[in-house]
Image (tube, rainbow, N blue to C red):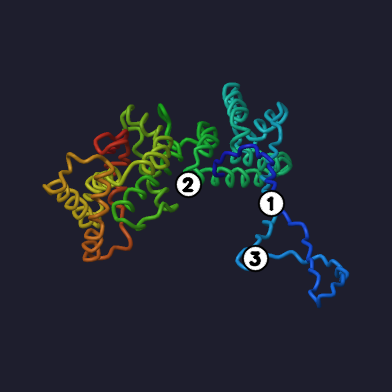
Amino acid sequence: MKPSSINSGIIAALCATSLAIGIGSPGMTVTPPAKTTPTIKTTPLPKVVPSKPVTPANTSIPNPPAAKTPTIIPLVVVPALTPTTLKSFTNLYGEVLAVKFTPNQEQRIQQRLSRDWMTNLGLRNTVAKTMAMEPQILRGTPAERSQIQATLVGNLRQQVLDGDKDALWFVSFYDASSKNWLAPGKPPLTQMTTDISAEALCFMVNEVMGKSVVTNDSRLKSAIATKLTAEYANIPANVKQELSRLPTNWLTFKTSEWVQRGDEFREQMRIHWGQNLEAYIPELKAINKLRRDRLATLKADPNIQWNRMNSIQRQGALQKSELDFQNNLRMLTQVKTVQISNYVNSMEVASSIGNSPTRYPLRLKVK
């Protein structure tokens, strides 16, 4: 359920115009009377024959341009969101999640649907797919309804890991129910938080290594969930608050800051992540040293004057040094997989994200 915006289409036809080409009037050919002896006779004029139009050899008459096919933008018809649909979906969604919505939650759902209905295709698809399952949800056996719930929630969680903020909003109602908590607390620990912790860890390790060496699979998510659940009672209250905000903060960081900011920001974040993680993941040490050395060399080069550069100039300097960096990288022992069990067992840093290498909304230390 990727979010996307659909604007109403406008049907427009482009009409081609043809050029009118003028044609000259036909000419007349006249033959004068022939001269004879001094005796002059009148010779009748020959029959007048219209001559053919003459076109100069070096002049070409262009053919009229072919008419263009009209470009038609299809009109997107968005079905109306009626009060009945709003109420039906809210009730049905509660059924499939096995959650009894509070009046406040019902109001939030209906306000969100009403606000984003016209522009959010992903949201409309979620409503349509849920409503299509109404017979199965309402008439299915407990086992069938449980399977539908597991499939829906599992799909939503994966869509969150893919960067879908709407999916995070939908699954948050499921996670808010106390029977779905991993550990109680203020706020409680949810599976979405532990899944995103695993996702952030994999992202950081792969960025430091410059390639995919770890995967956020079910084993890793389960290991981190088990560790955090067991230790959650000992985590300070302020860190619990930061953990509860981790899913939203991470999606915002990954889909906006990481994409929009330049190479210098990303490289500094890789170096910072590597420094935090290399004590627990030895495979990161060699490549992280290469990254630190490259940046230190650029900063120390008097011909570059790093401190006087703007962000665009620094990005250019990093790009110029990329060839040497890749050559040095090839000389290292090639690493295809990374063991992160030591990190998971210690959980010194669950995530380090932010808008600069010196600001990190979350530092988690579990004892």
Q: Do we see residue 346 in this rendering?
A: no
Q: Residues within 10 Å of mark 2 (few under 14, many from 20)?
A: some
Q: Amino acid at mark 3?
A: Pro
Residue 175 locus on image (x, y percent): 50, 35
Furthest residue in direction front, as rendered: 38
In which quadrant of the rendered view does residue 262 lie?
Answer: top left
Q: Of the residues under marks 1 and 3, which one precedes in the sequence?
A: 1
* Local secondary structure at mark 3: loop
Residue 51 locus on image (x, y percent): 78, 66
| Mark 1 to mark 2 CA distance (whole Å) | 54 Å
Q: Amino acid at mark 2?
A: Asp
Residue at the disc numbered 1: 19
Confirm or deny contact between disc 1 and disc 2 (CB under 8 A): no
Residue that appears at 59% across and 28% down: 115
Image quadrant holding the N terminus, namely top right
Residue at the disc numbered 3: 56
Residue 191, label in figure: none
* Local secondary structure at mark 1: loop
Residue at the disc numbered 2: 162
Q: Residues within 10 Å of mark 3 (few under 14, many from 20)?
A: few
Left or right of 291 in this view: 174: right
Q: Nearer the viewer, residue 358 or 305?
A: 305
Q: Nearer the viewer, mark 1 or mark 2?
A: 1
Q: Nearer the viewer, mark 2 or mark 3?
A: 3
Furthest residue in direction bottom, as rendered: 37
Left or right of 19 in this view: 305: left
Q: How many marks?
A: 3
| Mark 2 to mark 3 CA distance (whole Å) | 69 Å
Residue 256 locus on image (x, y percent): 41, 39
Residue 201 locus on image (x, y percent): 34, 47
In which quadrant of the rendered view does residue 361 lie?
Answer: top left
Q: Nearer the viewer, residue 180 or 208?
A: 208
